Amino acid sequence: MEILSIRIMNGPNYWSIRRHKLIVMLLDLQEMEERPSNTIPGFLERLKAIMPSLYSHRCSEDCPGGFFKRVEEGTWMGHIIEHVALEMQTLAGMDTGFGRTRQSDKHGVYHVVFSYVEPKAGEYTARASLALVEALIDGKEYDLEADIQKLREIREEVRLGPSTGSLVEEAIRRNIPYIRLNRHSLVQLGYGKNQKRIQATIASTTSSIAVELACDKEETKNILEAASIPVPKGHIITAEEELESMARRVGYPMVIKPVNGNHGKGATTNILTIEAAKEAFAAAKKYSRSIICEKFITGRDFRVLVIDYKFVAAALRTPAAVIGDGKSTISALIDIVNQDPRRGFGHEKVLTSIKIDDAAMFMLEKHGYTLETVPALNEEVWLKPTANLSTGGTSQDVTDFVHPSNIVMCERIARVIGLDICGIDIMASDLSQPLSESGGAVLEVNAAPGFRMHLEPAQGLARNVAEPVIDMLYPPGSTARIPIIAVAGTNGKTTTTRLLAHIVKNAGYNVGYTTTDGVYVQNQLMVSGDCTGPVSAEFVLRDPTVDFAVLETARGGILRAGLGFHNCDVAVVTNVAEDHLGLQGIDTIQKLAKVKSVVPGTVFKHGYAVLNADDDLVYQMRKELECNIALFSLDENNPRIKEHCAKGGFAAVYEHGYITILKGTWKIRVEKVTSIPITFSGKAEFNIYNAMAATLGVYVQGFKTEDIRLGLQTFVASPAQTPGRMNIFQFKNFSIMLDYAHNTHGIQALGKFVASVEASVKVGVIAAVGDRRDEDIVSLGEESAKIFDEIIIRQDKNMRGRPEAELIGLLTEGIKHIKPNMSIKVITKESEAIDYAIKNALKGAFITVISDVVPDALEQVKRYKDIDAGIEVDA
């Protein structure tokens, strides 16, 4: 078997609109297509032996053991690999359960689709699952545990930490979108101007001065001391020679820790001798030049969490430790502790397994112990100097037992330091007594405090401490989103997108939009090129200046990675026509329509899908949608429109020369088509469709009719507003039109307009795209022959897998089929083809250039226009 491709979905996609995180593996079964599982001796037994937990997979039998029954009866290897991939991730601590396997258009080749938690882990799982199944087929040994451990390592390397993860999960529960901004813990919550950022548990609202202050332990202590907060006695040193005098001043036991430390790194507690002090000094020096030496306050280690200057939670922390049984070595006791099912690798479970590292050996040596020492019965042996959960420590929730005076003190500390998310470390015998009575002290104030001890304490009540953070970032009445209008379809997407953006901008919004030409923010080009995929959509949604997004969404991006947004307010579908068929498994127009339908499938229930009622495939999409529907049509008497409006629905139609909104049985005439420049007085029928779609798209979003009218009146088919879309240049003796039409449907629509143009001769400069089917290229030639009197065949820069001669031959075949005697000239380079057309233009000619590289073609034609006007240009 062979993996042909692996695609990682991270948004609504062809396979599932609701399940966004999917691996789509194209798998060639090769000879295994003829060998289902029941024909392979011993396969089921070996599968059960290596992965018995697959018994829980119900499969189509809908009962435990259902999948094993399917394997016994006989199923194909793609289906088995799907289930193995899901279970392998679950065994590695990434519980996920959606999968499906579907045959492609090629014999023996399947789309194996399964969900993932982390993309890198999902991709690894795809390859490992194939390797495991092949080993089972061949009866070979396979090390599944190695794969599971590797997946755990990948998960820990790429996943969000438990604190950041809890904030993201809380945001998801509230339907707040998020974007991960780097490989680490920097995350954007919300979109555009309503975004907030978090990094670990530091938020965009957190004071940088407060963070800097909290990282300076000595300065923090001084400020707290000045505010009459109890803190340990101590000072800063920079050289080991100062240790002895400091020990005399502070007195034993001591704590030594780096000034700039966090999460307990480099800190040593309960130091009783000068020798131990020197070792602790060396450990702290690894993290900071300046070292704090202070009195070790005896008692228990507590962490108090204050969010938005309000007390939220408190936990008692205990360092990683073992309890002696009088007969087992410390090493054996650690193994026993690590067998606790609550302990796991990294952050996968409530507790982390205890590791033997330098810190553990240091703690043992301090007491004269080794790993082979046998502690006495009930003797507690600490293995780490600090009580961090990430090093194997435990926590107990004590939120309900904190004395009110201690709560007031902690809230005051957060205010004194200025931290809106604040972790306060306290050493005391008990927090149920005021610190003034218990003799406790505040040891540290922490920016970016860990949440894990509160979210998943080993004992006590779990606290959702992420909730108050999100409450702080998005208080009641605020929104994390910006309006999104998404545009899909085969033709007309870019013009509709640009017209929508124009209307929105004129209404006072800072609009960001994506097109096949590039990404724009307030009409400023930010990124050039075809920008209709998920990366470009995220570019707009990440921009903090944008308060309205209009996103053109093309087939390729949806199939490659899914959409770059999970929901939109309005989705416009212009039409569905044959284009790109035969690519990425989409070999019929019905499948293409399903790809396009992903976009309206993401509309909020209160939003609108704006659908072309004159297009059967688009109109059918309404049946699968849960949102409101609005329709547009060139015919006000279209039965679909009448039925829809009779039920109180919204529609846009072309009636009596107007673009009119139908609101139930009421008519709202928006503007005469003759006053809408892009329709060329109604001659460009396809742009009437685009204008209706845009009109309806903003109307259902609440825009005023007068704002829509102004937008329609001021949007012109020009290089500035619609580059490469019906850009007409009037020369003294002839005219040239540049357009991007690139498929049969587009050429047909363009042909209706060209037919309305009076000209002595109509010349077409055309090309074929290499990744289209033979019949599509021939059809393009046929339609071109119906429109033009003369044709110049050029070629795109990118042949997309076909020889030049083959493309020219197919186009010529189509042209000759309609007009056997037509004059055809082949000039493969686009710039030279345009040169030839202009230099040989007859008086009264109308030249149509179907352009590949729009910016280059525009510049070339503009240069000729300047020459024609007598303007001197550079050679």
Image (tube, helix red, strand yellow):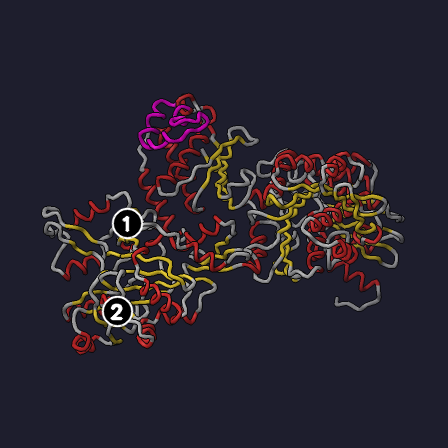
Residue underneath mark 1 = 459
Of helix, strand and loop, which mostly describes the magenta segment? helix
> In front of the other: label 1 or label 2?
2
Element marked by disc 2: helix
Residue underneath mark 2 = 436
Amino acid type at mark 1: Gln
* Horizontal and vertical percent position of residue 69: 40, 23
Instruction: Rate crowding at label 2 as few (under 14), some (14 to 19) or many (20 or more) other CA atoms within 10 Å.
Output: few
Element marked by disc 1: loop
Instruction: Kindly check if marks 1 and 2 are in contact, taking CB atoms under 8 A apart as contact.
Output: no
Residue 41 forms part of the magenta stretch: yes
Magenta stretch bounds? 40-69
367 sits to left or right of 492: left
Q: Nearer the viewer, residue 287 or 381?
A: 381
The residue at the point 28 percent across, 46 percent down is 343
190 sits to left or right of 326: right
> Does 469 sit above or below residue 287?
above
The residue at the point 72 percent across, 56 percent down is 503
Amino acid type at mark 2: Ser
Q: Kindly give the residue lying farthest to the front in the view shown.
A: 404
